[in-house]
Image: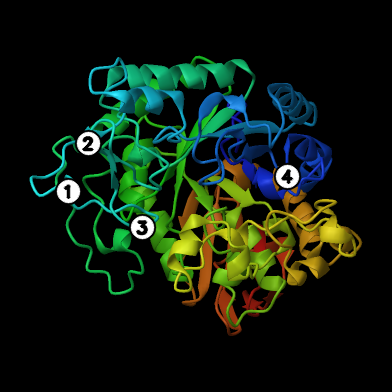
Amino acid sequence: MTQPDTPWWKGAVIYQVYPRSFQDSDGDGVGDLKGIIARLPYIASLGVDAIWLSPVFASPMADYGYDIADYRAIDPLFGTLEDFDALVAAAHALGLKLIVDQVYSHTSDRHAWFAESRANRTNPKADWYVWADARPDGSPPNNWQAVFGGSSWTWDGRRQQYYLHNFLAEQPDLNFHTPAVQDAILDVARFWLDRGVDGFRLDVANCFAHDPALTDNPPSHRADAVKPHDMQLHIHDREQPEALAFAARLRALVDEKPGRMTVAELFSHRSLEVTAAFTGSPCGYHTAYNFLFLGERFGAAFLREGVETLMRLAPEAWPSWAFSNHDVIRVASRWAAGRPQPQFAKLLFALLTTLRGTAFVYQGEELGLPQAEVPFERLRDPNGVAFWPADKGRDGCRTPMPWAADAAHGGFSATEPWLPLDPAHRPLAVDRQDRDPDSMLAFARRWLAWRRTEPAMRTGDLAFIDGPAEVLAFVRGGERLCLFNLGETAVRFTLPAGDWRVAFDLGGRLSDGGVELAPASGLILASA
């Protein structure tokens, strides 16, 4: 049962808004804060508990907001600080919490800190970024490879040194080995806490520190590697002890404000071990999600192994889970091959929000949106441009929300959007699903409304039980038996002894001491 003093974020469903693509209010083809405010009643109608707002801070948009030039300013593309304050107030008035993206690993190369740091080797911020001399032959200091291609090092003619960037050259890494950098970042966090935000989603939180010895990374031996970045194991350019020490400092600051929280994004080939390290103690982040369930691998055994491994590694930690976000192929396309839609999308939505933990739902997931097709000439993502066609990048999950099937640009904007609306998304638009009681949207609302009444489904413990190979079966809080057929064939699940009744129908059928589960169906059962 949920205890009265349980933090709001435990068992919460948090809805991610990607501002550029949610709602355009001023006709420039890019979503903005006033557009989000106008759509807050829709978000509240879903039955979610909170919003995660992707970056809206001042940025030259080399990586579309994840390259911040001023941590305390709203980019004019999205609005003003007053608009942000209005969003916080409006969300709270509807009973929604608001957490904001914080990108502390790196800044934009247009940030004033970097301008000062690169000026010379003796200025007050000379060590605020990671600088290193060239090797004797002029090559970079080591073999580290950037996520978006090429070396993680770029030569700077002013300082006659290389600077580190895990992502684009326009995103230089801050040096968390410098105490003043940590202090400055904590001041940024304090600024937004004072403006009333309810927490932070921390971008690539395991990348906050590097090995000062600049040791080469070993090879990964991945046969499927598309990028040089994936050809090595990233054990020296991230996940250092100083990142854990900073987590403790940030946690202490956030805990000064009752009801606030932190969720770390952990971008690692050692997803579960790193999640345990960053959330397994009271000094770590409140919770974290990783990329374990954001890749191609899928199946009941894989999902069970991931959850059980994290429970074993960090039994006291509170996990978070996501099946989609702004960086990966939408789950309705990624895992759906051979499975009926929209039934399978409904089942995945229920499964995500049934696992023990906090669930992050990406905008459009409640509509069952598939990955959009974006022609090469319309790509904006530097990752997609660099690695097309083997990796088409992230634009296909970032296209505009379809609000009205027959409206120009799907009701997102009065003008051509920054990314095109996929015609396949029009039939799934909000206005059409609003009118269909069998739609994915209607299901999401019905499911989350029921889930709110079930303490065991929000904060109860989780224990797996065995069954057919394609069925994921577990008990929440000792009260609800949850069955999900993730396979492509019908199966029968034999129930434990006892009298059972259907608590929520996901398409399965009780039958003579068992459950008949068609593909993409399930049942939530309670003891009669």
Disc assigned to residue 142: 1
x and y, in percent, of residue 126 in the image:
28, 22
Disc assigned to residue 358: none
Q: For mark 2, does the 10 Å Cα neighbourhood hold few (<14), some (14 to 19), or many (20 or more) residues? A: many
The amino acid marked with disc number 2 is Gln
The amino acid marked with disc number 1 is Asn
Please state if 195 lies on the left or on the right of 504 as rendered: left
Please state if 528 lies on the left or on the right of 483 as rendered: right
Which of pointers 2 and 1 lies earlier in the amino acid sequence?
A: 1
Which residue position is annotated with label 3?
Answer: 149
x and y, in percent, of residue 15 in the image:
66, 45
Which quarter of the figure is the N terminus placed in? top right
Residue 485 shows in this picture: no
Task: Give the alpha-carbon distance from disc 3 to disc 4, as whole Å.
Answer: 28 Å
- The front one of 19 and 437 is 19
Task: Give the alpha-carbon distance from disc 2 to disc 1, as whole Å.
Answer: 13 Å
Residue 349 shows in this picture: yes
In this view, the mark in front (2 or 1): 2
Which quarter of the figure is the C terminus placed in? bottom right
Task: Give the alpha-carbon distance from disc 2 to disc 3, as whole Å.
Answer: 20 Å
| Image-quadrant location for residue 302 | bottom left
